[in-house]
Amino acid sequence: MSYDAIVLAGGAARRLGGADKPALSVGGRALLDRVLDACPDARATVVVGGRRATARPVRWTREDPPGGGPVAALDAGLRRTTAELVLVLSADLPFLDRETVRALLDAAGADGAMLRDPDGRDQPLVAAYRAEPLRREIALLAAEHGTLTGLPLRALTAELDLARVTSRPLASFDCDTWDDLAAARARIREHGDVLEQWITAVKSELGIDLPVDTKTLLDLARDAAHGVARPAAPLTTFLVGYAAAQAAATGADPAQAVAEASRKAADLALRWADEAAADSAERNGSG
């Protein structure tokens, strides 16, 4: 589904003492980059805020005057887009994922779709809007108030017919305070989440878009460590990745290439271990 993305990254962050919130990191990556990673297939991505380094190319704009609030910022971003469907996100969502973005795009009805958090609160800055109804409401607000500066988002969304998508856990979690940031940093390191979060971060850092079968790779690392030697585990998984990349370059499905390379390496590690066990039994028997 073709869409443009608008990320609002120009707030004052008063509850963070005026810190550059989009640049604050969670899991070693800037909040803004984490949000950008959730919408990599946007036809165009417009960030409303001050220019900064980003993990992928974006278009930049600012509301006039700067600091005019979310409706003014959204208007500025919308002026730089042309798609009929526009994804609108705030820049402080450390756990937003591609599945949530896809659910919003798929659910966009007459005027769009908005995320609803687990507590039942609507999240207008995690939403997919139809561009024309959005432009219409912005124009009506500008005519009614003479300005968009300082207007709340609910004034914009009140007249729109928006479907609701129930948020997955943490997808709508935003970092408004230092406590929020600390909670996000702690959550990302929790045992049940840390591997998934780490692999997602590494793939983004390396520019890899590939499903990773964590269980298969961990099983392979275990077999290599136990059947050969402990240092064999990381070296073997590296070689599997290299072999899979070579196979993918010839047109093979990347996920299948990883699975096949992992299977071959795991079988080799098990044969290596069986051979060592047989040799040991033979030596013990001859002694």
Image (tube, rainbow, N blue to C red):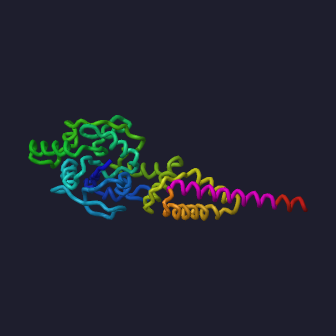
Would residue 64 appear left or right of 20 to someone viewing this image? left
**Front residue (pair 252, 123):** 252
Q: Where, by quadrant of the figure, is residue 286 drawn?
A: bottom right
Q: Position of residue 65 (x, y in %)?
A: 15, 56
**Residue at image x 70%, y 59%?**
227
**Above-or-below relation of 196 to 224:** above
**Residue at image x 23%, y 53%?**
81
**Residue at image x 28%, y 55%?**
9
Q: Position of residue 121 (x, y in %)?
A: 32, 37
Q: Is residue 260 within the magenta segment?
A: yes
* Residues in magenta, as a range: 253-279
Would residue 106 appear left or right of 49 to someone viewing this image? right
Q: Where, by quadrant of the figure, is residue 28 drawn?
A: bottom left
Q: Residue furthest front?
A: 251
Would you say the magenta stretch is mainly helix, strand or loop? helix
Q: Position of residue 55 (x, y in %)?
A: 37, 62
Q: Is residue 256 within the magenta segment?
A: yes
Q: Position of residue 182 (x, y in %)?
A: 41, 51
**Above-or-below relation of 262 to 235:** above
**Above-or-below relation of 133 to 262:** above
Counting labels gives 0
Which quarter of the figure is the C terminus placed in?
Answer: bottom right
**Front residue (pair 85, 160):** 85
